[in-house]
Amino acid sequence: MAWINTISPDEATGELKRYYEEAKKRAGRVFNIIRVQSLNPPVLAASTRLYVTLMHGPGSLTRGEREMLATVTSWANNCFY
């Protein structure tokens, strides 16, 4: 299994700390999918904007349906969601 260095929420400063705080407000904690992008805050910002747009933006699916699709897709890929 690969190992990726990350910056923990306790070590985060500046822009990264702000992104981590936003993640905590959204989800209650900083999940690994956020931490794995911690060495490149601009990428983290772009990824977060994409996620928020997909999960919270207008569309024909409800938020629950979107979460269900994400969960089933993660399960099919043997990933934790």
Image: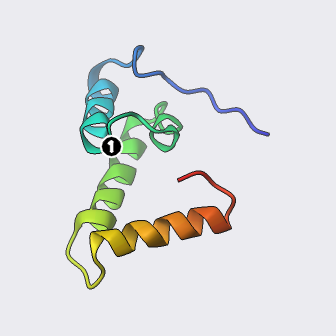
Residue located 39% across and 52% down the image? 47
**Closer to the camera, 66 or 7?**
66
Render colour scheme? rainbow
Q: Nearer the viewer, residue 2 or 56?
A: 56
Please name the residue that numbered disc 1 is placed on.
27
Neighbours of disc 1 within 10 Å: few (<14), some (14-19), many (20+): few
Q: Is residue 22 left or right of residue 41?
A: left
- Total labels: the figure holds 1
Helix, strand or loop under label 1: helix
Q: Residue at x 42, y 45 (%)?
A: 43
Q: Where residue 27 sits: x, y (%)?
A: 33, 43
x 31%, y 65%: residue: 55
Tell me the amino acid under the disc marked 1: Ala
Q: Percent from the top left, x then y, of residue 46? A: 35, 51
* Residue 59 pos. (x, y %): 25, 80
Residue sticking out furthest to the bottom: 60
* Residue at x 45%, y 40% (from the top left corner): 34
Quadrant of the image containing the N terminus? top right
Q: Residue 31 placed where, x, y %?
A: 46, 39
Is residue 4 depicted above or below 57 in this figure? above
